[in-house]
Amino acid sequence: MIKVRFAPSPTGVPHIGGIRTALYNYLFAKHNNGKFLLRIEDTDRKRLVEEAEAAIINSLKWLGLDWDEEIIHQSNRLSIYKEHVKILLDKKIAYEKDAAVWAKMPGNRTFSWEDLVGNKKISFEGKDQQDFVILKSDGFPTYHLANVVDDHLMGITHVIRGEEWISSVPKHLYLYESFSWDPPKFAHMPVILGPDKGKLSKRHGAKSALDYKNDGYLKETILNFIAILGWNPGGDREILSLEEMIKIFDIKDINTSNPKFDPAKLDWMNGIYIRSLSREELKAELEAYGVDLIRYPAKELDGLIELTKTRITKLSEFDELVNPFFNQKKQELESEEKQIRDNLKKKFSALDSWQEEKILDILKEEVKEKNKKMSVVYKIMIGAERGLPLPQALTIIGKEKTLKLLND
């Protein structure tokens, strides 16, 4: 059975690159009817961040990347690592120095493997490798030892991770050989680049999955967006559900070139997903996000949700667009703007049939007569320069509320 793992270190909250690693492992496991395991690599005690593990777990839960079996914590397995250190010491493959245990790399060897991303052979010469610590002076193992021991004992068949780990593979291959174990297959993904083609970082806006959740993105968007950051599902398809991704995912379709993070495309995709929701589904998403829909009149709410759905790219924008129609931001109007306000009030009051087309005609007529832009009307009515399409919005909220917006 295929087994893969997501093995984050709780030294910080993983940003979108780390979550992509989790997703690719998940997709590969589920496509092959295998298992997706979660291991917390918490051996670097000095760099632990208290809230990081909870953020890792909550991120995976929110995205629906459910893991199989119990979570493994490396800090609970110190006796296991020390047993394996003893094996290497007994074989004279490891030695003690400066209160730590080191593994001695052979200089007369070539370490090679076929990487599944791009099906390319990667080789390192042993003479170019340095001895490395496997057990630190504090009694905790280093990444190299714990990673290899746990992958073997957990039955991991494929290691799918970022290409920044390629340089560690010679050390790991040597440890596998030293323990007389078969190594897993390796797949190293190109790192994600920012818009300036530098490695994606916080300065590019790289955030955690939970940050994107708080910003008003749907989990379906985040999964879809990060999936195609380096994976080609075939053809020109870009909108894919998690179920569709599981069905077609193949490591051979991971690109060898570095993908570029495009915030504008993320917003576009979130808008696509929001517009695909039914009114009731969007209501549920808004409420789950924390929007207090009860504050808006039930009579107008359904219409406003349908209208807003065509305009927002994030759930966070709903209140920004809807609230001004019920809680107007008062702004000081110039004399000509006051005249436009009074004219609109007069013309709207005279309307005996409250219809979108008639409202639009009045708005167009007024801005044309005064040679003004529609932004002036927005300022007068809701105290902002832009917002929901006024003819549709005013039709929904009705004549009485519209006239209220035009009161002094």
Image (tube, rainbow, N blue to C red):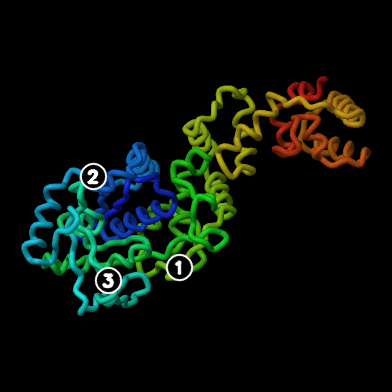
Instruction: Report which residue position mark 2 lands on.
Output: 71
Task: Give 294 or 212, whichever is nearer the viewer.
Answer: 212
Secondary structure at badge 2 equals: loop
Q: Nearer the viewer, residue 397 or 209?
A: 209
Distance of mark 1 from mark 3, alpha carbons? 39 Å
Quadrant of the image occupied by residue 391:
top right
Which tag, 1 or 3, sits closer to the chain's start?
3
Q: Nearer the viewer, mark 2 or mark 3?
A: 3
Name the spot of residue 311 as percent of width and height, x first. 64, 43
Q: CA distance from mark 2 to mark 1?
A: 34 Å
Disc 3 marks a residue whose amino acid type is Gln
How many numbered circles does the render carry?
Answer: 3
Amino acid type, callout 2 = Ile
Q: Quadrant for residue 330, please give it.
A: top right
Disc 3 element = loop
Identify the residue under disc 1: 234
281 relative to 108 in the view: left or right:
right
Residue 382 position (above or below residue 203): above
Task: Report x, y in % for residue 138.
Answer: 20, 46
Distance (Cα) linking label 2 and label 3: 33 Å
Is any atom of residue 196 visible in this view?
A: yes
- Camera-side residue of 142 and 282: 142
Circles 1 and 3: CB distance less than 8 Å?
no
Q: Is residue 404 above or below residue 180?
A: above
Q: Which three-letter amino acid code belongs to the residue tagged 1? A: Gly
Q: Which residue is mark 3?
A: 129
Q: What residue do we see at 88% from left, 39% from top? A: 367
Quarter of the rendering occupied by the C terminus: top right
